[in-house]
Image: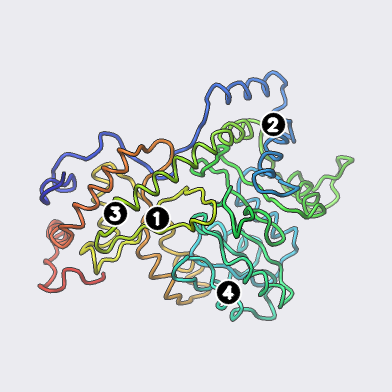
Amino acid sequence: MKRKVDDLALFGGPAAFLRPLFVGRPSIGDRSRFLERLNRALDDKWLTNGGPLVGEFEERVAEVAGVRNCVATCNATTALQLLYLAKDLTGEVIMPAMTYVATAHAARMLGLTPVFCDIDPVTGCLDPLEAEAAITSRTSAVVGVHLWGRPSPIDELEKVAARHGLHMLFDAAHALGCSYRGRRIGRFGAAEVFSFHATKVVNSFEGGAVVTDDDGLAQQLRSMRSFGFGADGHSVRLGTNAKMSEAAAAMGLTSLEAFGRTVVHNRANHARYRSELHGVDGVSVVPFDDDEDPNCQYVVVRIDEAGTGIHRDLLMRVLKAENVVTQRYFSPACHQVEPYRTERPVTLPRTERLSEQVLNLPTGPAVSEADVRRVCEVVRDVVAMGAEVTDRSRRQAGHAPAPAGRANATR
């Protein structure tokens, strides 16, 4: 236990963990199964260009999402770009700023203008009223983001898009296997995009996919990911090289086989975090809807300095010294980074407040229940002496201690 400030590793005490715990440690699955698949690809000498492993992976992902079509790609950013191109988007695209910057970059690199809107302060997802208020004559689409796997207000956003004749798309990078009102994420809007990056709940080293029930759109995307080739092998439209390799698909299939076990483990970790941190001043674990099927890929806590006496960023430093490596998903928000803060300055109060507070704690198959208990013990101990930790940190940095009565003031 960290009973006093000097016990903290940041100030010279022993670290709580011998080895670092990470957010998003890859879920590898059965290594022998991966190597078996990889050896098959090597034996067949079919390493890319729509091999059988990619086809199988697409079928399995489509089953999980409950859709007819899955178009696998080399990464999710490229998948978003292909989808934006396939829907022939122009002008402005409305989206939340509380997302990974790839959601915006994919649009900006195509010459589109991301228009950032504020969020629901409870869910962190795009507020339909804010989205509708941002629509102009130049708007071509609304892009919802299922933040941390928590579904966007899908019905309301789809109604907004329909009223104004806009395309409705979803960035579902975090939401494989999650549900919305009993239906699997992947079936909404014109299409949704999953990520299979190494840090995701299912990974293919690097990878992504567009899922849709629109057969024509899927056919177009399959052509566009392979240089725009048609059935005869000649270019019939603009395209690029966005194909998933057989090696990536081998990893994806193997990780997907472990998906069910991973979700069970993640849910248990999330429940343990909620239990262990319940009642800690200024610390609240972001919940998932018990009526849905969350994959609990992330354990997100909100750190309110008014209650903890310590700012989120300093808590991160303290935890890192204890070998608990946390993340800020997503801080700063998209509108606070370049090129957006210069090109199109905007103030989003709810987004900025949430972004200032979020902290992602380690979870996944590599994090045990005992690990969770120990992480929570450290968090509780640090918060119990939060003001003292803050003042000690300020003195180490050469700053004067916070004035009396203001130790808990927001930075």
Q: Residue at x 26, y 42 (%)?
A: 374
Circle 3 sits on which residue? 277
Amino acid type for the residue under numbered disc 4: Pro
Q: Is residue 354 left or right of residue 225?
A: left
Q: Position of residue 55 (x, y in %)?
A: 73, 36
Amino acid type for the residue under numbered disc 2: Leu
Circle 1 sits on which residue? 300
Question: Which label lies toward us, 2 or 1?
Answer: 1
Circle 4 sits on which residue? 128
Q: Quadrant of residue 306?
A: bottom left
Q: Earlier in the sequence, mark 3 or mark 4?
A: 4
Measure how far apart labels 3 and 4 are at the Cα level.
Answer: 32 Å
Amino acid type for the residue under numbered disc 1: Val
Q: Quadrant of residue 128?
A: bottom right
Q: Is residue 241 left or right of residue 33?
A: right
Amino acid type for the residue under numbered disc 3: Leu
Question: Which label lies toward us, 3 or 2?
Answer: 3
Asked if disc 4 and disc 2 are in contact, CB closer than 8 Å, the reply is no
Q: Which mark is residue 53?
A: 2
Q: Quadrant of residue 112?
A: bottom right
